[in-house]
Every structure is written in C-alpha cells, then in structure tokens.
C-alpha cells in the first residue's frame, strides 16, 4: 500500500489529468489504497487549489475541473520535453503566439530538472522553423484552445461563420479535430444542420458558444482527419482553374513540391495531373514554376494572361540584366 502521502497525491493528480473522469474504485485500485484514502487525498488536492468535482453513488466519480487560477501541473519527462520543444518552435498561423510561447518556455525551463535541460537544448539547437509569409490569415490561440477542448469533450458548439464568398451563416456542429495546413487552421466537424461533415477555417469563425451538450463520437470517413481535410481542401471551388498534365511521375513531383499533396494525381509511371487552381493568380504561377519539368496546361484565360505577362517580364529582365553596382 502506498504510504507516502505527498507522492501518492501527485500520482493521483497525474491520473486525474489523463482522462475526463475516474471512479473512486478505479483510482483506489491504481494507487493500491482504499476508496476512503482516495477521498482524503482528493481533499488535500482541493486544499492546494485544484478544483475536483465529485458525484456520489454507483456511477459517481472524480473529475479535474477548471478553476479561477492555473494550479501546478504534473508532467512526466517525455511530456515536459515535448512541451518545451513545442513552445520553442511555436505553432505558426496563430496571432500573438510567439511572445506567449517564449514566456511559458522560460517558466518551464526554470523548474525543469538538469537531466531534461540537456535533451531540450539538443533538440532546440537542431530544430528550425521558417515563416514564409506573416501577412496572411492568423488564427486566435484562445479560439484554438477552446475548440481543442470542445473536440476532446465532443461538446456541441454554435458559432458564426463567414464563407469564402463573404456570406455569413450560423452553424451548429459536433467538433472532431483541428488540422493545420499551409499556414491555416481548420476545424473538422459534423454539421448538425447539414447532417454531413464540414471543414471550417478558424480565421472565419466568430463567437463560438459551448452548448453544454455532448454528442457520441463519430467515425471520420476514411478514419484519418488530416487526409479528409486534405481531400476537402483540394476539392474546394476556386476562382481560377489551372490543371497541368506533367511529364514526370507523381512521386517525383510530390518529392519536389511537398505542399501539393492530394493535388497530384498519377496517370502512369511517367506522367501525372497537377491541379494548381487557386483564388490567387500569383500562387498559381508559383505552383507551376515549382514543377520544374515540362507540362501541358489547361487553364482559364485570366490565368494564361497572367502567366504570359509574368513570363515576358522575366524574359526582359534576363535579356537586359542590371549591371553590377560598384
């Protein structure tokens, strides 16, 4: 039987953090103590500022709840290292996250054991992130956290959503997963009004409201959230159409253009189809230039005009380069 009250309380706290609810009997079994001892240890944690809800009866149990302040967390070695490295690299596409991540990292490193600091330092010096464009849409980290909690708890949400054409709608969804792609964040959810799966860009979501109602977990078509979102993104309507028939294998094209993903379709071993359609003409030009192989193009007139103008501009620059300055 566990006799170290402090160590046992920390172990109890670690268990409460791993899942939404525990029965008293389950906790007692995991800690090798009596149910009465579990109740006393729960009271000790409450005295330290942790908000632990409990329900009596056969189906009762304990749940770590949100309080007015953030009490200390119990992390194992792997969790501490993972959080430190994640804070160091900080998620892209989020407004104001960089400064907040650095403050949190400084606090974590201050209390981190010496044996872990070396591991974190080695990882930090070996990792680097590149932000190509900070002028695009940025998601709110508070919104991201709220949606993540709703996904974990399968809690039904309502929010206002602005579609790509600017039209505003009110949505009621069962949130399932958050997916980052191309500097943007997407919420994958089952829309209760549409009775179908939908993806929502976080920068277009406003005024989310938790309903307090929970839905039974649903199975994603295909079972992979990231793959599902990638398929929906590639199938979404765009303003300009541009499809290239490329004289290279699909695997070779994907290897040289990591961001294309499902937009590449294999035709045979030596050719593939690349859908470069987009709302932005300049992005279409960059996608096609990145192919770096011969291709035939089927595109809207506006796309062809833009590519022709861009090509002529580059040819003029190449034909008359500016002389080097002294």
Image: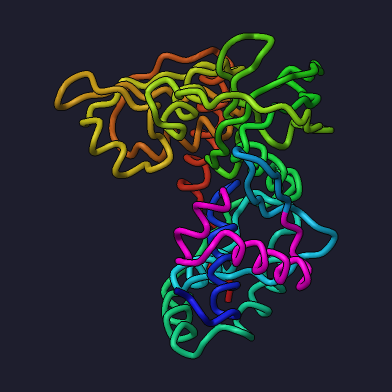
Total count of labels: 0
Which segment did they paint magenta? 23-52
Q: Is residue 274 magenta?
A: no
Residue shown at the point (64%, 42%) measured from the top left = 60
Viewed as shown, does residue 50 lie left or right of 246?
right
Image position of 223 with respect to 41: above or below: above
Q: Position of residue 233 (x, y in %)?
A: 52, 25
Q: Nearer the viewer, residue 114 or 55?
A: 55
Q: Quadrant of residue 112?
A: bottom right
Is residue 323 visible in the rendered structure shown here? Answer: no
Viewed as shown, does residue 297 lie left or right of 60?
left
Is residue 172 visible in the rendered structure shown here? Answer: yes
In the picture as drawn, the residue positioned furthest to the bottom comes out as 114
Q: Nearer the viewer, residue 81 or 38?
A: 38
Residue shown at the point (75%, 47%) measured from the top left = 140
Residue shown at the point (76%, 49%) measured from the top left = 142
Position of the C terminus, as image quadrant, is: bottom right
Q: Position of residue 138 (x, y in %)?
A: 71, 45
Position of the N terminus, as image quadrant, is: bottom left
Q: Quadrant of residue 59?
A: top right
Q: Main secondary structure of the magenta part?
A: helix
Q: Position of residue 51 (x, y in %)?
A: 76, 59
């Amino acid at each position: 039987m566990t006799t170290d009250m402090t160590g046992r309380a920390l172990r109890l706290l670690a268990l409460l953090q791993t899942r939404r609810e525990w029965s008293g009997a389950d906790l007692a079994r995991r800690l090798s103590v009596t149910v009465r001892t579990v109740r006393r240890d729960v009271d000790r944690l409450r005295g330290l500022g942790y908000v632990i809800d409990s329900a009596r009866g056969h189906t009762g149990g304990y749940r770590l709840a949100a309080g007015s302040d953030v009490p200390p967390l119990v992390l194992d070695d792997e969790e501490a290292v993972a959080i430190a490295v994640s804070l160091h690299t900080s998620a892209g596409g989020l407004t104001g996250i960089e400064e907040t991540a650095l403050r949190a990292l400084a606090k974590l490193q201050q209390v981190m054991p010496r044996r872990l600091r070396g591991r974190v330092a080695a990882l930090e010096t070996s990792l680097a992130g590149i932000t190509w464009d900070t002028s695009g849409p940025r998601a709110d980290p508070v919104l991201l956290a709220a949606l993540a909690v709703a996904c974990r708890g399968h809690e039904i949400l309502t929010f206002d959503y602005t579609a790509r054409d600017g039209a505003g709608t009110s949505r009621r969804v069962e949130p399932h997963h958050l997916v980052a792609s191309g500097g943007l964040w997407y919420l994958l959810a089952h829309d209760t009004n549409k009775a179908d799966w939908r993806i929502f860009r976080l920068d277009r979501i406003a005024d989310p409201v938790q309903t307090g109602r929970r839905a039974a977990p649903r199975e994603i078509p295909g079972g992979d959230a990231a793959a599902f979102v990638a398929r929906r993104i590639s199938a979404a309507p765009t303003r300009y159409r541009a499809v290239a028939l490329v004289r290279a294998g699909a695997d070779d094209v994907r290897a040289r253009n990591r961001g294309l993903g499902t937009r590449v379709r294999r035709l045979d071993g030596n050719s593939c189809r690349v859908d470069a359609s987009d709302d932005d003409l300049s992005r279409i030009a960059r996608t096609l230039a990145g192919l770096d192989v011969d291709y035939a193009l089927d595109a809207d007139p506006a796309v062809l005009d833009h590519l022709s103008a861009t090509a002529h501009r580059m040819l003029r620059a190449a034909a008359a380069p500016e002389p080097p300055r002294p």
